[in-house]
Image (spheres, rainbow, N blue to C red):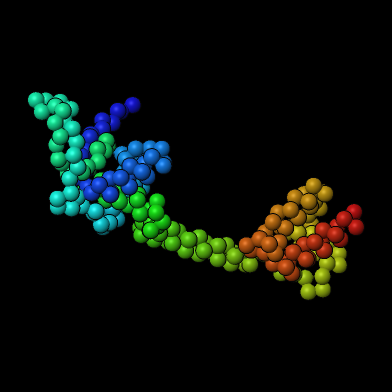
């Protein structure tokens, strides 16, 4: 298992932006890095690059922090507001800031995103067209191979066997007749993609005739 080493990024931003990100992370019970990583994983890079970068803090906006180490430890220091974000190495500060801004916009309901890429939509559309074409081809085959309903209905055992698809002279047993009926009903039932009400009615009539005649 490969361990992904994380890098600590310093993200200059306005105080309002930083506070909003930290508040959202607290509500979601995650940290700022988790918010950014979630967006980076699901949003295409091109879409993220097109999202506005909230940018660095306005000129003159500074925060005061107490230095904790070095010769100046304990002294106040004015610096640009920032976020510390831990993520795998290789991201730019601007992309991370955009990802956090997008997370805020989504959480606020200011925008939605469609995760289907145009290529995926096109592929799905082409696949759907191929399936429709195949379904139409199967309908044509069924219509060509299916029996033509007898104009005067089923009047004899031979006609009943003909409707169920048995060749002339064949004398099937009850098990074979039931199996043939189930198969034809699956194809010709009006609720099936290839269904035909007239054929299904004659299949039922043939089965009833054979049951009555024994």
In the rendered image, which quarter contains the N terminus? top left
Percent from the top left, x then y, of residue 80? 17, 44
Q: Quadrant of residue 183?
A: bottom right
Evaluate whether residue 89 shows in this view: no
User: Is 101 left, or right, of 130 in this rendering?
Assistant: left
Q: Residue furthest front?
A: 75
Residue 124 vs residue 204, the one in the foreground = 124
Residue at 86% of width from left, 67% of height from top? Answer: 155
Residue at 30% of width from left, 45% of height from top? Answer: 19
Q: Residue furthest left?
A: 71
Residue 45 vs residue 27, the one in the foreground = 27
Percent from the top left, x then y, of residue 212? 90, 57
In the rendered image, which quarter contains the C terminus? bottom right
Residue at 32% of width from left, 52% of height from top? Answer: 102
Q: Residue furthest bottom?
A: 151
Residue at 13% of width from left, 31% of height from top? Answer: 75
Count the marks. Answer: 0
Percent from the top left, x then y, of residue 147? 70, 66
Residue 156 vs residue 24, the one in the foreground = 24
Percent from the top left, x then y, of residue 76? 15, 34
User: Is 132 left, or right, of 153 in this rendering?
Assistant: left
């Amino acid at each position: 298992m490969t361990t992904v080493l994380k890098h600590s990024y310093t993200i200059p931003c306005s105080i309002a932006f930083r506070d909003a990100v930290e508040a959202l992370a607290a509500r979601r019970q995650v940290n700022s890095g988790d918010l950014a990583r979630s967006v980076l994983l699901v949003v295409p890079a091109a879409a993220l690059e097109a999202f506005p970068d909230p940018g660095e803090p306005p000129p003159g906006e500074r925060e005061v922090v107490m230095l904790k180490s070095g010769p100046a430890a304990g002294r106040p220091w004015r610096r640009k507001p920032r976020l510390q974000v831990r993520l795998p190495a290789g991201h730019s500060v601007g992309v991370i800031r955009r990802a956090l801004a997008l997370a805020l916009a989504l959480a606020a309901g200011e925008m939605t995103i469609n995760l289907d890429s145009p290529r995926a939509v096109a592929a799905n559309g082409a696949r759907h067209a191929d399936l429709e074409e195949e379904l139409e081809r199967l309908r044509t085959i069924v219509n060509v191979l299916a029996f033509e309903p007898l104009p005067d209905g089923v009047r004899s055992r031979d006609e009943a066997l003909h409707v169920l698809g048995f060749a002339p002279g064949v004398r099937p047993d009850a098990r074979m007749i039931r199996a043939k009926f189930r198969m034809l009903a699956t194809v010709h039932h009006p609720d099936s993609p290839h269904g035909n009400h007239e054929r299904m009615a004659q299949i039922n009539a043939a089965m009833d005739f054979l049951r009555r005649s024994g």
